[in-house]
Image: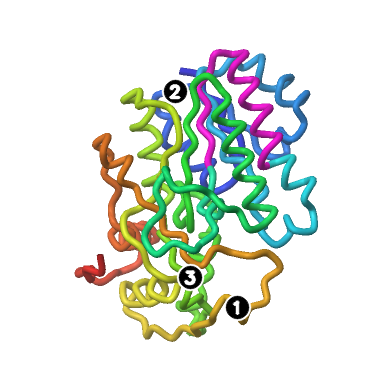
Amino acid sequence: MRIAVVGARGQLGAALIHEFAGAHEIAAFGRAELDISDEAAVDALLSPVKPALILNAAAFTDVDACEDRPIEALGSNAFGVRALARLAQTCGATLVHYSTDFVFDGNASTPYTEEDSPGPRSVYAASKLLGEWFALDAPCAYVLRVESLFGQAPGAPAPKGSAGTIMNTLKAGGSPKVFEDRTITPSYIPDITRATRQLLEMKAPGGLYHCVNTGQCTWLEFAREMARLLGLEPRVTPVRMADMKLRASRPIFCALSNAKLRSLGIEMPTWQESLKKYLQGLGHEVAHEIADRQ
């Protein structure tokens, strides 16, 4: 099968290439090759490829910058997705698009399901929700909401994102600042790419899925578990969201339920299990026991 991977230079895009490349023909497009907000460029570059599957990992993810650059946010996160959906319709391709937990308002107390109503509270969140709607206009489309990503494809550059920052700071003897009041479902990128492949291989019904690991925690709990696994003192600095004066609003509670995936037979490991696997993959000695905090 011929697959077009868009957003191919990011952590998720590179991991998707690693997941699918062994059995399929991959055409990879990073931002330098393709700005999806340019619909003419989408058509000019992807139409000759004639993909049977389009995997879209491209996004403008700087949540605070989106507040100041809403046109760019809408171009990348919404109208660019519309361009891909139109291209998928023309080519008869399946579209997989990745969205975010930020589409929710954060007022829940139990993990959000696909049936819960979104309530975006920032430009970034609104642009991603609009992108979901555009993606689902494609004849065959999957929208996979992911969140709090960690991990990368083998051989990829040094760890990025919040998890990478926490790990590097802990290893350097520092005390990373972590939210004590923001509840998330940390999600391991290789688990997400595996679940994506399984959904496609089983020809699951198209639509919206929460593609995350199992369980929930605060960033403080995540950092402490990482320190425990690394055998380090959990020297972290708890902070509260209200004290950080962030440009864009974040949902306080944004854990997602993966029960819909489980109903199809796709089991997602707990975030603790995958955090251990992640650290081991980086060559770290880790603790043998994982605390049961479910």
| Residue identifier under label 2 | 24
Q: Is the C terminus in the top left, top right, bottom left or bottom right quadrant?
A: bottom left
**Hey, which quadrant is residue 207 in on the image?**
top left
* Magenta stretch in the rendered image: 77-98
Q: Earlier in the sequence, mark 1 or mark 2?
A: 2
| Residue at 37 percent of width and 77 percent of height | 224
Q: Is residue 75 above or below residue 206?
A: below
Q: Which dot marks residue 177?
A: none
Percent x, y of residue 44: 74, 19
Q: Amino acid at mark 1?
A: Ala
> The residue under label 2 is which amino acid type?
His
Amino acid marked by disc 3: Arg
Of tags 3 and 2, which is closer to the observer?
3
Question: Measuring 30% from the left and 69% from the top, which residue is drawn there?
Answer: 285
Tell me: residue 245, above or below residue 201: below
Q: Residue at x 30, y 46 (%)?
A: 259
Marks 1 and 3 in Cβ contact (< 8 Å)? no
Q: Which mark is residue 182?
A: 3
Can you give x and y, in whole percent of width and height, for residue 167 in the image? 46, 71
Residue labelled with disc 1: 242
Foreground residue, 4 or 113? 113
Q: Residues within 10 Å of mark 2 (few under 14, many from 20)?
A: few
Q: Quadrant of the N terminus?
A: top left
